[in-house]
């Protein structure tokens, strides 16, 4: 049988090849060997998807293949989700999160949602492709402490500013902490659009959110 390092390598390969059942099996094996769910998530799944991203960028992988990889990753995340959520962390606050209009990438957002739940936040997930109206409606309905927005495309990240500007127009911007994230963003962008903070990854999102709650 494979040692841990070989097994993680195998997950990267299986994710790359979109082999959902194999990814699921390996996640179970790593957990069975005592790996912490977060370690399985980052070292096996997130790292595997990073490799997929490189070959997608370089035109070696195409959308159909990347979709299979994404579905395999999601299957692995489904196994980890209850383990990451059931930490018994004290209740922290409420967050509404969604991917912005025009953008259907949801893995990173889902991961942030999972980690936030594990840290004791109540999370209302609006899914993908959210126009400003959806965010406004959710803030009205759920009265969250935090609004989280995700964008993975350089063409969709400017939409975050549309949402924030609309909040300003309606006089509600200061009622919420606005956190933004996604691979093409950075600190300067977050500042320029008037967000409260940029979150590089899910762990940073949790720490940042906690910081605003205390
Ligand atoms: Co897309 N795609 N994709 N894609 N895709 C990228 C983003 C790209 C960088 C790939 C590349 O060329 N290297 C590129 C964008 C280039 C750019 O804009 N500069 C790209 C492109 C071009 C496209 C299409 C246009 C391709 C096409 O059709 N020709 C198309 C667009 C569709 C659309 O949205 N309208 C498209 C489609 C797809 C798939 C459907 C095939 C699939 C998405 C499946 C899904 O999500 N259900 C897909 C995937 C999987 C990727 C890559 C390979 C992986 C993204 C991912 O899931 N990463 C991606 C390459 C890359 O990012 N390097 C790519 C894993 C995830 C854990 O990381 O999402 O970064 P990430 O989330 C992190 C942090 O960013 C942060 O925390 C997360 C966890 O640590 N974070 C937040 C994210 N959101 C946050 C919100 C917060 C806080 C933190 O709120 C508080």
Image (spheres, rainbow, N blue to C red):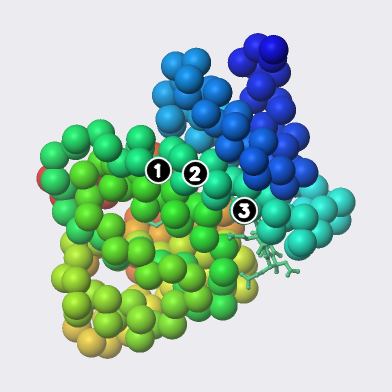
Q: Tell me what residue is drawn at x 55 percent, y 23 percent.
A: 29
Please tell me how crowded label 3 is: few (under 14), some (14-19), or many (20+) other residues with Cα within 10 Å. some
* Residue identified by numbered label 2: 77
Q: Tell me what residue is drawn at x 27 percent, y 87 percent.
A: 169
**Residues marked 3 and 1 touching at CB (< 8 Å):** no
Report the disc number at residue 71. 3
Q: Nearer the viewer, residue 91 or 25?
A: 25
Quadrant in which the C terminus appears? top left
* Residue identified by numbered label 1: 81
C-alpha distance separating marks 3 and 1 = 15 Å
Q: Nearer the viewer, residue 195 or 23?
A: 23
Residue 170: tell me if it is visible: yes
Find numbered disc 2 in the image and state the secondary structure of the residue it sits on.
helix
User: What is the quadrant of residue 206 in the picture?
Assistant: top left
User: What is the quadrant of residue 192 in the picture?
Assistant: bottom left
Is the C-beta of the residue carrying label 3 under 8 Å from the nearest atom of ligand 1?
Answer: yes
**Is 177 located above or below residue 51 in the figure?**
below
C-alpha distance separating marks 2 and 1 = 6 Å
Say which label, 3 or 2, has the lower sequence index: 3
């Amino acid at each position: 049988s494979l040692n841990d390092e070989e097994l993680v390598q195998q997950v990267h390969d299986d994710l790359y090849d979109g082999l959902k059942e194999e990814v699921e099996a390996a996640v179970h094996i790593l957990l069975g060997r005592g790996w912490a769910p977060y370690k399985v998530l980052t070292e096996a799944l997130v790292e595997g998807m990073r490799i997929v991203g490189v070959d997608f960028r370089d035109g070696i992988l195409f959308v159909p293949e990347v979709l299979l990889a994404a579905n395999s990753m999601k299957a692995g995340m489904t196994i980890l989700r209850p383990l990451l959520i059931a930490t018994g962390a004290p209740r922290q606050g409420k967050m509404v999160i969604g991917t912005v209009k025009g953008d259907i990438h949801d893995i990173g957002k889902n991961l942030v949602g999972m980690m936030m739940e594990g840290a004791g936040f109540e999370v209302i997930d609006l899914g993908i492709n959210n126009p400003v109206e959806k965010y406004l409606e959710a803030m009205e309905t759920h009265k969250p402490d935090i609004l989280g927005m995700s964008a993975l495309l350089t063409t969709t990240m400017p939409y975050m500013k549309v949402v924030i500007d609309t909040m300003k127009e309606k006089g509600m911007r200061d009622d919420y902490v606005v956190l933004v994230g996604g691979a093409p963003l950075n600190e300067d962008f977050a500042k320029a659009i008037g967000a409260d903070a940029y979150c590089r990854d899910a762990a940073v999102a949790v720490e940042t959110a906690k910081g605003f709650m205390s």
